[in-house]
Image: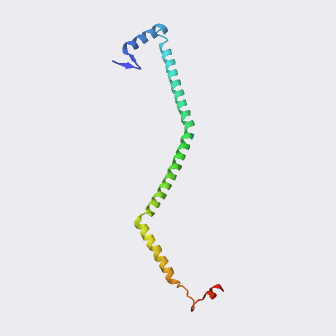
């Protein structure tokens, strides 16, 4: 079944006959011309509405995109910081860091020998 805009072929023929009876054969081109102009104006108006809607919402979409980019940047920074901290918590690295810190402490204590008093120290010497 042929349908154009939910109208079957028989219904189209009836509509054409009614238009022919109401307007006459001479005025049908004028009626078709007016319908064409009306459809064209309707199409332009709908395109204008779409264009204005896009223009008005473009500011909002730009703000949303900027906000999303800022959030994504912060998320990446936090993720990299977390990954860095997680890699620092590696038990093998912690053991190496502790051993190197002990080695530094040992080397520093070897460089400065403790000072011992010359001779025996009495209680009276300590009080003075």
In-front residue for pair 46/69:
69
Q: How is the image coloured?
A: rainbow
Q: Residue at x 45, y 9 (%)?
A: 18
Find residue 103 and report its horizontal and vertical position in percent: 46, 77
In-front residue for pair 91/71:
91
Q: Is residue 8 left or right of residue 119?
A: left
Residue at the bottom extreme, as displayed: 119
Question: Against 61, is 25 above or below?
Answer: above
Find residue 14 and report its horizontal and vertical position in percent: 41, 10
Q: Quadrant of the N terminus?
A: top left
Question: Against 66, is 80 above or below?
Answer: below
Find residue 8 and report its horizontal and vertical position in percent: 37, 16
Q: Residue at x 48, y 17 (%)?
A: 32
Question: Against 56, is 30 above or below?
Answer: above
Find residue 111 and report its horizontal and vertical position in percent: 51, 83
Question: Against 33, is 120 above or below?
Answer: below
Q: Quadrant of the C terminus?
A: bottom right
Q: Residue at x 46, y 75 (%)?
A: 102
Residue at the left extreme, as displayed: 1
Q: Residue at x 53, y 50 (%)?
A: 70
In-front residue for pair 47/120:
120
């Amino acid at each position: 079944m042929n349908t154009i805009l939910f109208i079957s072929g028989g219904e189209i023929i009836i509509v054409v006959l009614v238009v022919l009876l109401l307007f006459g054969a001479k005025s049908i081109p004028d009626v078709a011309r007016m319908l064409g102009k009306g459809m064209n104006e309707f199409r332009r108006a709908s395109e204008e509405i779409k264009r204005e809607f896009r223009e008005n919402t473009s500011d909002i979409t730009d703000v949303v995109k900027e906000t999303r980019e800022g959030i994504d940047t912060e998320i990446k920074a936090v993720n990299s910081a977390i990954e860095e901290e997680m890699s620092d918590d590696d038990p093998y690295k912690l053991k190496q860091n502790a051993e190197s810190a002990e080695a530094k402490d040992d080397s520093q204590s070897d460089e400065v020998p403790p000072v011992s008093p010359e001779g025996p120290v009495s209680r009276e010497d300590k009080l003075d």
